[in-house]
Each structure stands twice: as structure tokens, then as C-alpha cells.
Image (cartoon, rainbow, N blue to C red):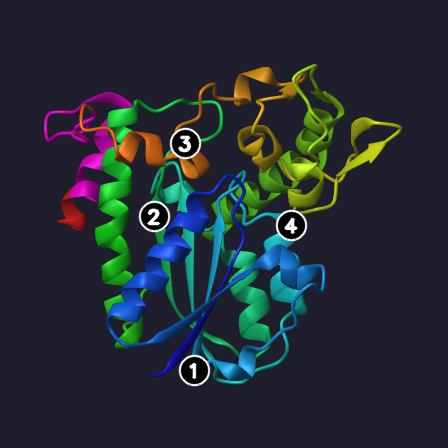
Amino acid sequence: MKRIGIFYFSGTGNTEIIAKLLSKSYERKQIEVELFRIEDIVTHKKPFVINDFDMIGVGHPVLGFGASGITDLFAQMLPHCPEKKAFIFKTASSPHYLNQGASAAVIQAMEAKGYRVFHNSIIAMPCNWYIKYDDQLNKQLYQAAVKKVDKIVADTINTQEQHLKINGVLSKLLRFLYYGEEHYGAQYFAKGLAASANCNRCKKCVRDCPTNNISEADGQICFGSNCIWCMRCIYACPNHAIKARHLTGCVLDPYTGGFNIDQLLNNPQINGNYVTEKSKGYYKHLIKYFEDAE
């Protein structure tokens, strides 16, 4: 194997972190990697170059139990490529069973076009929606992710099969919930977005919105209804100027994952040992996840 193409969508930076860690891990094994943002492919800023690679990887965050409409669209746009080896990686706030089927529609679309999707994985990263994790846990998740990435690299180089299965009926129910969240919940959320007086009209949000949902008109930042609730505009704003007026509880302040993770990784006072073998309640399900990363 000589070249791998990794195509990823990342709302607030967690999936991009994993894509870059994968790239570095492959390169340590003398395998050339090229990274592509999925929104650049979907908007035709970059062409499809699938045939240039021996294998491709597709990465996305889990948004409402799904892969996000932009990732689904990318999979539908992929050219036919019989027997091209492919792997899926996704990030979520939890490796919980309910998140395992989030890539189902993407895999189905890829396999219909001949791709051999032989490896499917999920990596837990800092939560960016409703639940604010302790920074010790965020650091612990990142440290585990580094080890998980090396395992994915070893498995994919050796064409080791790994499939995440979920009950079919439950998968359909979660797909229904995902559709509702992305199409109705996201639209309602977007209607409440507004730029505060802190906005200096740098237009970073306009340039960076993956669905071109943000524009400037008459000196004002405007938000449309083509939102996928990825939260990128809010968390990436350098002036913290974009505010939500609907479903405000979903916004974490401050958010120390994704784009802002360096501040905790470089802080020696954060020990990254939040979940232990004695943890109880919600975090108990992460014990095995961290043990498997060792």
C-alpha cells in the first residue's frame, strides 16, 4: 500500500483531529496520505481523485445518531469504484451502542458503488452538544484517541475486518430521529442564531460554514435555514460573537474540545485521569473503552 486518501467532515474540530492523527500514524509507516475536507468535494472546490489512492477513509462526527447530510451527500456523489478498499471512522461523545449505526447510510451508498468497506470504527472525543465534559475527561479521551488511531492504522494496513452492528429496527428508529433533528431541529436552531455586538464582520463564519448557510447583507451577518447543527460557526468564532436564542442549552461555554483542545493538552495541571475502574453512573460505560485503548 502506497497512498491513502482520507475524506472527512468535521463540525467543531474533533473529526479533523482524528483525521490528522491518522495521517501522521500512516506516514510513520511510510504510507503517503492526502487529506480532503468533504465540504470542499461537495461544493466542487476540489475534484474527486479516488483512483489516485490504494485505499480511502471516510470520517464524520455523529450528529443526532447520523453522519450529517453533507457526509451522506458525499457518499452519494462518489464515483463507482469496484473493489476499492475503504474504511470508516467517526467521532462521538460516547462509544455507546446507539452511535454504532451512524455510518449505515454512508456505508450502504458506498457499497452500492462497489467500495469494499471492511473497517468501521468509533472514537470518543469531547462532547460539544448539551453535556459539558470535565477537562480531565476531555484530555483522557484525546490520549485514548491517539492509541485508538494507531490501532485503526494497523488494522487497515492489514485489511483487518471490523464491523459495528446495530439492531435493524433500532437503526431505523434512530435514523428517523436523526432526520428530524437535522431537518427540523437544525432549522429551528438556525432561526435563533444572531451575531452580537462583538462581531467585527471578519466573515470567518461565512467562509467556513459547510452548507453556505451564512451570508452578509447590508453589513449584517445573516443565517439561513440550511443548517445541519454542526456548531462550527459558534465555536470557531474568534470573537465569540455568534449567539443562539433557540435551544440555548445545546451550546457549551466554554467548549474545550475540537478547535480549542490545545489549551487543555498543554496544561500540566489537567491530569487526564477522570474515569477510573471505580467510576459509576454515566461514565461507567467508558471504563472498558479506556481499557481497550491500553
Q: Position of residue 235 (x, y in %)?
A: 53, 30
Q: Is residue 234 left or right of residue 285?
A: right
Cα distance in 3D space between marks 1 and 2: 24 Å
Q: Is residue 240 left or right of residue 29?
A: right
Mark number for residue 86? Answer: none
Dividing the picture into quadrants, the one containing residue 218 is: top right
Question: What residue appears at the point 16 percent right and 28 percent down from the top-left corner?
Answer: 271
Q: Please tell me which residue lies in front, 102 or 135.
A: 135
In front: label 1 or label 2: 1
Q: Is residue 275 left or right of residue 165?
A: left
Cα distance in 3D space between marks 2 and 4: 20 Å
The mark nearer the N terminus, 2 or 4, is 4
Q: Please tell me which residue lies in front, 76 or 39.
A: 39
Q: Element at badge 1?
A: loop
Q: Which residue is mark 2?
A: 123
Does the image show residue 164? no
> Disc 3, disc 4: CB below 8 Å?
no
Q: Amino acid at mark 3?
A: Cys
Q: Which residue is mark 1?
A: 54
Range of magenta residues: 270-290
Q: Amino acid at mark 2?
A: Ile
Q: Please tell me which residue lies in front, 247 or 216.
A: 216
Question: Callout 1: few (<14), some (14-19), or many (20+) C-alpha neighbours within 10 Å?
Answer: some
Q: Element at badge 2?
A: strand
Q: Which residue is mark 4?
A: 69
The mark nearer the N terminus, 1 or 2, is 1
Vertical arrangement, residue 270 with respect to residue 83, above or below: above
Q: Position of residue 13 (x, y in %)?
A: 47, 43
Q: Which residue is mark 3?
A: 127
Does the image show residue 93? yes
